[in-house]
């Protein structure tokens, strides 16, 4: 992805967050220059990858397949000084955009439609070897338990949520009209480097960046040490 594209996406997500009256923490507003004088008292942000995360999954088609995320809080299962066993994110998808099919080996999460467009989440059971199974899927949505066929597209309108359990394959798809969607994620600790299994082995998690302009905000894997 080009840095200019990443910059614009972050600005768009900031505007969407503002429209839905959600206040974000101070570190989410720091410029690259402000980050340059932040000492080790902010290592929790660095170590747990709090902040902005924009990805095209390494496919180079962000307008079609991509995700924009802001991690607000997170623990760390490998570092004893961080005791939180939970995480929280905001996520944005543009209209017509999708996110790659994947499951989590360990993390359980609730995905909440915080406002804007509808979002459709396709669900499959996954096997321990990563295969997609064609078995019926148990779905929990806002206290209601349902059994649906493999490959069902579950619709979340604003205010609705779904619980994603380990080995539950899921993707995200936003209708081609109706604007962007703002999602929330409340989950166990997040570890994007080790806990994601993508159905397409060619998919990656973090993008290659072409530096065509200066960063508006640093991404969560770019902070100075």
Image (spheres, rainbow, N blue to C red):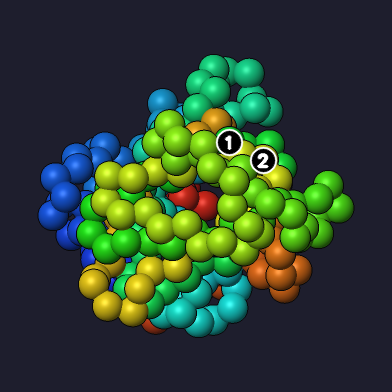
Label 2 crowding class (10 Å Cα cut-off): few <14, some 14-19, many 20+? some
Residue plotted at (38% across, 69% down): 174
Residue 208, percent from left and from top: 56, 72
Up-down relation of residue 7 to residue 90 (above or below): below
Q: Which residue is mark 2?
A: 166
The image quadrant of residue 81 is top right
Q: Residue 177 at x, y = what percent? A: 27, 78
Report which quarter residue 76 is drawn in.
Answer: top right
How far across and how far down the image is residue 8, in percent?
28, 71
- Answer above or below: position of 40 versus 83: below
Foreground residue, 191 or 121?
A: 121
- Mark before the other along the chain sequence, 2 or 1: 1
Q: CA distance from mark 2 to mark 1?
A: 6 Å
Residue 45 in sight here = no
Q: Is residue 166 left or right of residue 97?
A: right
Q: Secondary structure at mark 2?
A: loop
Q: Residue, x 55% and y 31% (percent of image)?
A: 188
Residue drawn where x is 65% and y is 27% of the image: 77
Crowdedness of circle 1 by 10 Å Cα count: few (<14), some, many (20+)?
many
Residue most toward the right?
129
Q: What is the number of the mark on residue 202?
A: none
The quarter of the picture where residue 141 lies is top left
- Disc 2 + disc 1, Cβ < 8 Å: yes
With respect to residue 55, does 61 lie above or below? below
- Residue 55 position (above or below residue 224): below
Labelled disc at residue 108 = 1
Q: Nearer the viewer, residue 224 or 117?
A: 117
Q: Nearer the viewer, residue 147 or 119?
A: 147
């Amino acid at each position: 992805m080009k840095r200019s594209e990443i910059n614009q996406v972050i600005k768009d997500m900031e505007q969407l967050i503002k429209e839905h009256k959600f206040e974000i923490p101070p570190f989410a507003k720091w410029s690259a220059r402000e980050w340059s004088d932040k000492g080790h008292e902010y290592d929790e942000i660095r170590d747990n990858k709090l902040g902005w995360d924009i990805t095209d999954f390494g496919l180079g088609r962000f307008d079609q397949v991509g995700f924009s995320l802001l991690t607000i809080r997170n623990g760390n299962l490998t570092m004893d000084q961080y005791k939180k066993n939970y995480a929280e994110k905001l996520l944005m998808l543009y209209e017509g955009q999708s996110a790659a099919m994947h499951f989590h080996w360990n993390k359980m999460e609730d995905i909440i439609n915080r406002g804007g467009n509808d979002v459709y989440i396709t669900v499959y059971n996954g096997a321990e070897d990563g295969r997609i199974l064609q078995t019926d899927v148990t779905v929990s949505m806002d206290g209601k338990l349902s059994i649906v066929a493999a490959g069902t597209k579950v619709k979340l309108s604003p205010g609705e949520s779904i619980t994603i359990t380990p080995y539950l394959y899921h993707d995200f798809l936003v209708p081609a009209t109706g604007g962007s969607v703002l999602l929330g994620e409340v989950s166990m600790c997040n570890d994007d480097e080790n806990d994601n299994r993508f159905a397409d082995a060619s998919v990656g998690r973090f993008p290659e960046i072409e530096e065509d302009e200066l960063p508006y905000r640093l991404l969560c894997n770019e902070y100075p040490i």
